[in-house]
Image (cartoon, rainbow, N blue to C red):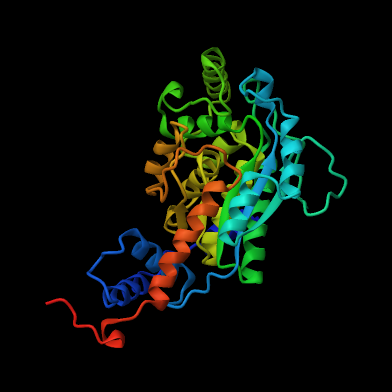
Amino acid sequence: MNIVETTLERIKPVNAELLQQAQAKLDNKTKPLGSLGRLEEFGRRVAAISGTMNPDTTKKVIFTFAGDHGVTDEGVSAFPKEVTPQMAFNMLAGGAGVNVLARHAGVEVRLVDVGMDYDFNGALGLIDRKVARGTKNFAKGPAMTRDQALAALKVGIDQADQCKAEGVAMAGTGELGIGNTTPSSAIIAAISGMPVKDLTHRGTGINDAALANKIRAIEQGLALNRPDPKDPLDVLTKVGGLEIAAIAGLVLGCAANGIPVVVDGFISTAGALIASEMHPNVRDYIFAAHASVEIGHRFMLERIGATPILDLNMRLGEGTGAALAMGLIEAGVKVLKEMATFEQAGVAEQL
């Protein structure tokens, strides 16, 4: 039995009793019932996921998984794939969008190389878990082998297991990889059966002709590879990405370890979608950080059953939305833990 199978076996439903206890505690706070809206949802869910009415949210980590994509050969991105390692160096230096927003939110960023087509030679701060130097061009054949997909899933699972060992209270997903909106659109198209044109957007900002070409490349890849919508690992293998696989692994691992996982935007949600298709209980551990501008994102969220926390017209990726959402989730936990009850405050309860 491989680590993916053993991880799937460890995933249990969220503690329903703790959910009720946390809501009862929230209902007794000095406020009208339900008046803090979704903050109350965040607090009770974190309590139930982590197995305690007093969750410690001090240690928060975003994992930005990086990988390159062979399908960029089809001209699906406005940027060349050389930008992926260039942005990785920027992130290691603390200059990327996710670094700024994570510092603001008190969150650590860890960059994991799972599939960049570049030799970093032990660059300081980079977690080297390279499975391959990018995927193959899925418009010409499968993106990767099944063994590569399993190896990339293991990268994410290992990070989640490390989180448990370190006492990380909340994990976030992020990604880096030129061309990665293309496999993300292909994944939701394969699983949902919806037309590719209804799920595919401009990614890095491509023009109309490039968008038509991107749709063609995805349609060609789906027709050629015929991924099985009932087998998420087959979909991942044939039209996915190595960083998407690692995100799926992190989500699975967080669910297995009782750690809330904050999923960023379109590409991260493609990984979360694969994970939730692999095990139905996974979705109870997921917080959807924000609604991406990418048109396929809404359909992914609907499939998972997740309501986004923020809607800020963002589409950067990297884990930027996760960093912002973590602060709101933590606020909900602090309401649960710190807000006075009617009795403590000497306030009369509503009639």
At 37% from the left edge and 76% from the top edge, which residue is drawn?
Answer: 339
Residue 339 seen in the current view:
yes
The residue shown at (29%, 85%) is 345
**Which residue shows up at 11% across the image and 77% down it?**
351
- Closer to the camera in the image, 94 or 262: 94
Q: Is residue 311 above or below residue 11?
A: above
**Rendered view: 156 above or below 73:** below
Residue visible at 65% across and 51% down?
99
Give percent across and percent down for residue 177.
Answer: 66, 36
Left or right of residue 344: residue 171: right
Q: Is residue 334 left or right of residue 101?
A: left
* Depicted 313 relative to depicted 54: above or below: above
- Outermost left residue: 351
Residue at the extreme right of the image, as rendered: 121
Q: Is residue 224 left or right of residue 132?
A: left
- Picture coordinates of residue 200, whole percent (x, y): 48, 26
Q: The N terminus is located in which quarter?
A: bottom right
Camera-nearest residue between 38 and 274? 38
User: Taking the image as drawn, is residue 1 in sight?
Assistant: no
- The location of residue 303, given as percent across then percent down, is 39, 42
Looking at the picture, how far across and down is residue 76, in whole percent? 61, 21
Counting the numbered discs, the total is 0
The image quadrant of residue 39 is bottom left
Q: Is residue 210 above or below residue 98?
A: above
